[in-house]
Image (cartoon, grey):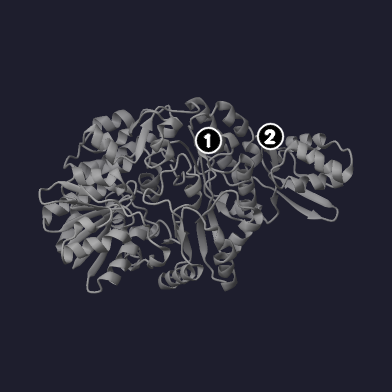
Amino acid sequence: MHIVLANVPWSPIGFPSLALGLLKSLTLKEFPDAQVDVVYGNLDFVDWITSRRPDFSYEDYRYYDLESCYIGTGDWVFSSALYHDPKWKVPEFLEKFGPQATSDPGQDLAHGTTVESRTQTTLWLHEHVEEFTGELAERIAAGEPDVVGFTTTFQTLTASLAVARRLKELSPRTVTVFGGANCEGPMGEALHRNFGFIDYVVRGEGELAWPGLLRSLREEPAFEAVPGLCWRDESGTSVFNAVSTKPLPPAAMVLPHYDEYFEQFSKSHARFWLEPRLVIESSRGCWWGEKHHCTFCGLNGASMMFRSKRPDQFIDDLVTLAKRHRILDVMIVDNILDMAYLDSLLPHLAEAGIDLRLMYEIKANLRYEQLEIISKGGVVCIQPGVESLSSKVLKLMDKGVSGCLNVRMLRDAESLGLTVIWAYLYGFPGETDEDYAKIIEQFPKLHHLGPAGGDDRLAVQRFAPYFENPSLGFQERWAASQYALTYDLPEKELFDIAYIFDATHQGIGNDMAWKLRAGLDEWRNQHWRSQLSYFETDEGITITNTRPGFDWDVVQLTTDVERALFHLLDQPRTLQYLERECSKRFGQTDVSAVIDRWMELGLIFTDDGRMIHVVTRDRNQRFMQIQVGQGLSASDRPSPTPVAV
C-alpha cells in the first residue's frame, strides 16, 4: 500500500507536522510493508511564491498562517482554487476586508503592514494559487498513491480541499482522507457531507481510527467499526461513527517521524527566513479544563481527559529527536504542563545537562520556585495563558487566577530570563470599561515586564462553554462571515463546518478596545528600554529604574518596615494584611504612607483590593533587553500570538 500524508498552506513552516509525523510512525509500525511519504506542501508553497514574488516574506506567510486566523483571510485565498474561479467572491471580500479602515481593533487586518498592501497581496494570491494547488496535486497523483491523508488545522482547510478536489480529478481511484482539528465533531460530518471528493473523514484522535481505516481499505471492509469515521454506505449516504470514549493512553503515543521535513527544509527558501524547531508532546488534554473549562476555550474537542507520558519515556523521545535532527529548540505542544513533572521530568532534564531550549504552556499561578525548576530544566519560553490582568475578567473566563497572580507570573518570569508569550483578550459578557481603565493606567508600571504580543476581541469557538451554553452571554451566534466568503454552502452547512462564530459583541466597546491597544502598543515600544530590578545587601534593598514613565533612577529601602513590606508584597496582599503583619512585628506603623510613596514610584500593581510589587530580581535583564530591542524601530509591532480563542 502506498500512502501519502500531506501538509499544505497555511500550516506553520518553522517546524514539522506533529500529526503527520505521528501517523507515519504509526503506519509503519502497523504496516511495515507500506510505503509512506510525507509531502510538505507548505514548504513547496514558500518556494512557489518566492519564485514569483521575491518580496513575499516570512511576515507575509505568518499573517496568513497565524495573524488572520480568526478572520479567515488565508482560507479565502485558496477558495479560488477550490471553485476553479480566480475571481471567486472578490467584491464580497473587498466589501468586508478592503483598504477602508475598520472601526473594530479586533478586526485589524494589518498587523505590521498597511491594509492596502496586504489587500493587494491577498488578491494576487487569490487569483494565482490554483496554479500551485494544481501542481501539488499533479505531483502527488504522479506517484499513484492508494491513500492520501490531509491534516487540517485552522487555515489549512481550503487549500487541503482544493488539492484533494484536483487530486480526485487526476486520480479517481486514490482514496482521500481528512483529519485534524478542523474535522472534530459536526465539522467533520459537514465536510464529508458536502464535499464528495473526500472519501473518509477521521474524527477524534487519529491513532485510534487510522489503523482501522487502513485495514478496512486493505483487507476486509469494516468501516462501521472504526471509531469516529465518516464514510459512505452502498447508497452513497454519509455515515458518521461515534468517536471513541476511551482516549489514547500515553504509552501508545509513538515517536514522530520528521525526516522528510528536515530534508525538504534544508533545500527550501524557508531556510533563509528562520531556524527550524522540533515539535513534540508530553501530554494530551487539560487537567484544569477537566475541572474548570475556561469559558472561551475551544481546544480539546476530541477529549479533555488529561494524560501524560512517563518522564523517562518523554526524555527518551526528546533526546532521540534532538540527536537525530541536531535541533536544540523544541516546542512542546501540550495544553498545560503536568505539575508532577516539577518533581520528575524537569529535575531529570536539569541533572542530565542536556542543552535544549524548550517551550512549554503552563498555568499562570506557578510560584517563583516552580518557575525556577522549569528554567533549570531547559525551558526558555513559556505560554502561561495570562489573557488579562483584571481579576474580574479572569473570573468571567474561569481561569482560576487573579490579576495580581498574572503580574507575579510576568515579574518572576522576567527575573528568571524566561520569555513569556501571551495575548490580551477582551469582549467577555459582564465586563465593563472600568475593568480595563484601571488596569491600562497601570501599564507604565509594567513596561519592564514581557508585554502581550497581541490583543483580540473574544471569538466564540466551537466546543467552548460560550458556544455550548448560550446562557453564559452569547445567546445568538452564527458562522463567522469568512465561511460564507470562502465556501459555496447553505447557511446551515456553514454553521456545521465553522469553528469560529460571530455573535453580538459583548463587554467593552471599540473605544475602550482602542485604548487597550494603544496602551499595549506603548508597552511593546517601551519594553526594550525599560528596567526595574533590585538587589539586597545587609544595608538594605536597592532598586534601579529606567522605565520612561517614572523619573527616578535609584531608590533604597533601608528601614526594617520597608524591607518587611517589600518581601511581604512578593505575593498579593491586602492593605489590611500588611498593616496587621507590620503591627505584629514593629508595633504601630504608618504602612499607608509607605505604600502611597511606592505607588508614586510605580513599584506596586493593584487589582481587586490586593497589591503586589512589580520589581524583578537583578539578573542583568537590562543588557538582554538592549540586545533584543536596539534593532527595533518605534513603529515595529510584534505579531500577536496563537490564542486559545
Q: Earlier in the sequence, mark 1 or mark 2?
A: 1
> Residue 328: percent from the left, percent from the top?
48, 66
For residue 481, above or below residue 147: above
Q: Amino acid at mark 1?
A: Leu
Q: Residue at x 39, y 28 (%)?
A: 475
Q: Residue at x 34, y 59 (%)?
A: 19
Residues 51 and 316: in front is 316
For residue 527, above or below residue 351: above
> Residue 556: percent from the left, percent from the top?
81, 46
Q: Which residue is mark 2?
A: 609
Q: Amino acid at mark 2?
A: Gly
| 345 displayed left or right of 108 | right
Q: Which class describes the residues within 10 Å of circle 2: few (<14), some (14-19), or many (20+)?
A: few
For residue 246, above or below residue 108: below
Q: Which residue is mark 1?
A: 396
Q: CA distance from mark 1 to mark 2?
A: 17 Å
> Residue 547: percent from the left, percent from the top?
67, 42
